[in-house]
């Protein structure tokens, strides 16, 4: 699978900028880039749905 970075629209999630490379695929896993911009803050969270690396 080849996904061009410029074909993905980043979105904001409570101060984090997220690029989900596999959002348009129907798979059981995903690959995303999460950027924490200077001064960003995000509440602590835990997910039972997935493992994050």
Image (cartoon, rainbow, N blue to C red):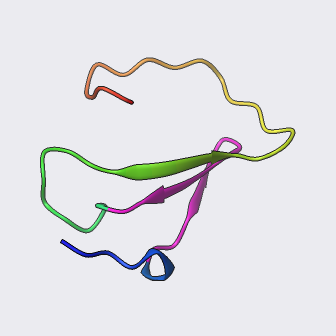
Q: Residue at x 39, y 30 (%)?
A: 53
Residue 52 lies in what quarter of the image?
A: top left
State which quarter of the image contains the N terminus: bottom left
In the displayed structure, does residue 41 sit left or right of residue 1?
A: right
Q: Is residue 41 left or right of residue 26?
A: right
Q: Position of residue 23 (x, y in %)?
A: 31, 61
Instruction: Please tell me which residue is depicted at 76% across the width and 47% down the height of the picture.
Output: 37
Relative side of 28 to 35, left or right: left
Q: How many marks?
A: 0
Residue at the image position 27 percent from the left and 49 percent from the top: 30
User: Residue 2 at what x, y percent from top left?
Assistant: 25, 75
What's the magenta region?
A: 8-21
**Could you say which is closer to the camera, residue 33 or residue 25?**
33
Residue 38 location, x and y as percent?
84, 43
Q: Quadrant of residue 24?
A: bottom left
Asked if residue 6 lies left or right of residue 14, the reply is left
Residue 50 quadrant? top left
Residue most extreme to the front? 2
| In the foreground, 15 or 36 | 36
Instruction: State yes or no: residue 19 in magenta.
Output: yes
Residue 4 inside the magenta-drawn segment? no
Q: Note whether 46 is above or below 26 in the view shown.
A: above
């Amino acid at each position: 699978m080849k996904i061009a970075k410029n074909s993905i629209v980043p979105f904001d999630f409570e101060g984090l900028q997220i690029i989900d490379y596999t959002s348009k695929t129907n798979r059981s896993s995903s690959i995303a880039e999460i950027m924490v911009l200077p001064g960003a803050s995000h509440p602590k969270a835990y997910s039972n749905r997935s493992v994050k690396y």
